[in-house]
Image (spheres, rainbow, N blue to C red):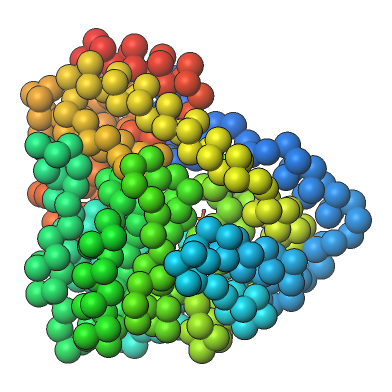
Amino acid sequence: MDRPLLNRRLAEFGTTIFAEMSALAVRTGSINLGQGFPDADGPEEVREAAVRALRDGRGNQYPPGPGIPELRTAVAAHQERFYGHRGLSYDPDTEVLVTAGATEAIAATLLALLEPDDEVIALEPYYDSYAACIAMAGARRVPVTLRPDPEAGSYRLDLDELRDAVTDRTRLLLLNTPHNPTGTVLSAGELAEIARLAVERDLLVVTDEVYEHLVFEGEHLPLASFPGMRERTVTISSAGKTFSFTGWKVGWVTAPAELVTAVRAAKQFLTYVSAGPFQYAVAEALALPDSYYSGLREDLRTKRDVLARGLSDAGFRVYAPSGTYFITTDIRPLGHDDGFAFCRALPERAGVVAIPNAVFYDHKDEGAPYVRFAFCKGVDVLREAADRLQKL
Ligand SMILES: *Cc1c(COP(=O)(O)O)cnc(C)c1O
């Protein structure tokens, strides 16, 4: 066979850096701050809820296609509780769809809404599944680059560049706030401007808000709550990051009924359904008191500060995130400018694993000197990593 096995839509996505770096972490006994998963599981009572569901025979067979009613009701109640004051609410029966994590929600949404050759504008650097899913849909990605502002210590969206990126072929904007990997939280002003643009150019908007409860500065504002947006916006979130159960893969879409119906058409042939008993547990998790959500945020804020201080002391230029559990650093003050080479050598040099931001870019040059560290780990683990990095 002289034809490559992997089709040409996916050829560029053949290997992920996460597998390489996690293997390197194991081989060298390094602290793995590469992949973003917590090193402690979520609340005991939520785990117990999953056990109870399994034992009681709830969810052990195919759950309903749109998700169990208890979870759809809990998702709608969560939206009302946190965003109702902004006028946002959803009907649990027609406007909520449960998915296999945010990952399936993204895939199903893009496969449902895109025609071949449609253009999709996404904020670069981007979460790796965006590019792959746009490619699977046969559409074209158009990156708009978030740029670091060393003075401010944060990344900025250039709204003029976003406006200029819209063409007659643009079908949708794919946004992510709080943003992985840069930690950017889009401001009310930026979101209002994005909303105006979407309305003016009649664009669909897909917004990945899996870090909605991990905002350290400012507040999370759902894009769907801006004028003219609810009717054109698919909002995606998940239990993975909010409840520290990334292995459960329970996510959801909230959107107007026509959009949910479209997304469901694709979703039913990807997984059909998933995570039956876990859906019952996540329904209970969403109803946890406000103190759970604020406790999670404060815990991660402390961890952010510990790691940011350690990285800064070690000589990195630190872009302290306003949200998410990632810190982006600039390695040039340490005398390096190639994040790939730096990350491949870091385990041997310092016993720590990080991810080169270039993997999240189409414009590899823009991301070359930046490296991402995850801080969703125990404080003692972060302190140890910080100590190890001081030898750089
Ligand atoms: C982790 C993550 C996801 C995937 O969420 P799952 O629920 O685990 O599928 C999607 N988007 C972003 C930005 C993420 O960081």
Q: Residue at x 77, y 49 (%)?
A: 50
The residue nearer to you, when weighing 39 against 48, is: 48
Q: Quadrant of residue 28?
A: top left
Q: Residue at x 53, y 58 (%)?
A: 82
Vertical position of residue 334 compared to residue 343: above or below:
above
> In the picture provided, is 184 more to the left or to the right than 129?
left
Q: Quadrant of residue 2?
A: bottom left
Q: Residue furthest right?
A: 56
**In what quadrant of the picture does the N terminus appear?**
bottom left
Q: Position of residue 362 (x, y in %)?
A: 19, 59
> In the picture provided, is 32 more to the left or to the right than 197?
right
Q: Position of residue 249 (x, y in %)?
A: 60, 56
Vertical position of residue 41 compared to residue 59: above or below:
above
Residue 275 at least partly seen = yes
Vertical position of residue 345 compared to residue 73: above or below:
above
Q: Position of residue 205 (x, y in %)?
A: 35, 75
Residue 339 at least partly seen = no
Q: Residue at x 44, y 41 (%)?
A: 36
**In what quadrant of the picture does the C terminus appear?**
top left
Q: Residue at x 28, y 65 (%)?
A: 191
Q: Position of residue 67 (x, y in %)?
A: 68, 71
> In the picture provided, is 300 more to the left or to the right than 45?
left
Q: Quadrant of residue 56?
A: bottom right
